[in-house]
Image (spheres, grey):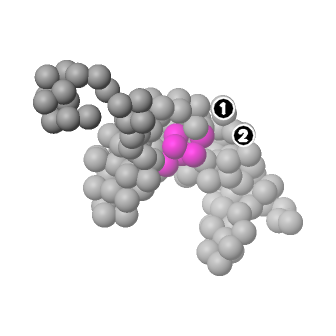
Amino acid sequence: MSFWRRWFGGGRSPHLKPQRLDYLNEALALERQGDYEAALTSYRLALRDNPSDPRTLQNMAIAFTKTGQQDEAIRHYRRALDFDPSLVGAHYGLAFLLKGRGETVEAASHLRAFLAHPPRGSDAERWIRHAQATLRECGEEPGTVP
């Protein structure tokens, strides 16, 4: 297509398609840089493309926590768990936010859900021990972890 046709609105090439930005990866990169407010903007755009993505909702909850917006963090953790009740990271994060508000019964419930299917990996043992100790602080025994 010639310059003049493009400039003055001539026909479009059928092979040109608009590219979608990968807002989720952009948000994750912004978080790594410590720019949580900008990350939240990118997460919102990612949710516009996929409003029921539990991992995006969980990541938003983490960013909200880091910006001191606990109520929004709790709301997003709960939405993530509505879509995927097995999301152990959301149970873990939500438990500690609830415990901080004094809601120990619900916090303990989420800690038990986390401990029922703990994550695997090099850092997992640290998170498991922390969850077990917190559960004891809530007045419950953590039991055994598979």
Instruction: Please report contact status of discs 1 and 2: CB closer than 8 Å, yes or no.
Output: yes
Please give the label number shown on residue 85.
2
Q: Position of residue 25 (x, y in %)?
A: 44, 53
- Residue 19 can be seen in this image: yes
Q: Position of residue 19 (x, y in %)?
A: 39, 40
- Residue 99 can be seen in this image: no
Q: Which kind of residue does numbered mark 1 sit on?
A: Asp
In depth, the one of 76 and 102 nearer the eye is 76
Residue shown at 71%/63% (left/top)? 119
Q: Position of residue 61 (x, y in %)?
A: 47, 44
Decide: is 35 above or below 73: below
Q: Which residues are magenta?
A: 54-59
In the image, 33: left or right of 62?
Answer: left
In depth, the one of 4 and 110 nearer the eye is 4
When asked about the image quadrant of residue 43, the answer is top left
Residue shown at 42%/36% (left/top)? 15
In depth, the one of 27 and 34 nearer the eye is 27
Quadrant occupied by the C terminus: bottom right
Q: Which kind of residue does numbered mark 2 sit on?
A: Pro
Residue shown at 35%/31% (left/top)? 13
In the image, 39: left or right of 47?
Answer: left
**Mark 2 residue element:** loop
Please give the label number shown on residue 112.
none
Quadrant occupied by the N terminus: top left
Decide: is 5 above or below 100: above
The majority secondary structure of the magenta stretch comes to helix
Which residue is label 1 attached to?
82
Q: Position of residue 98 (x, y in %)?
A: 55, 43
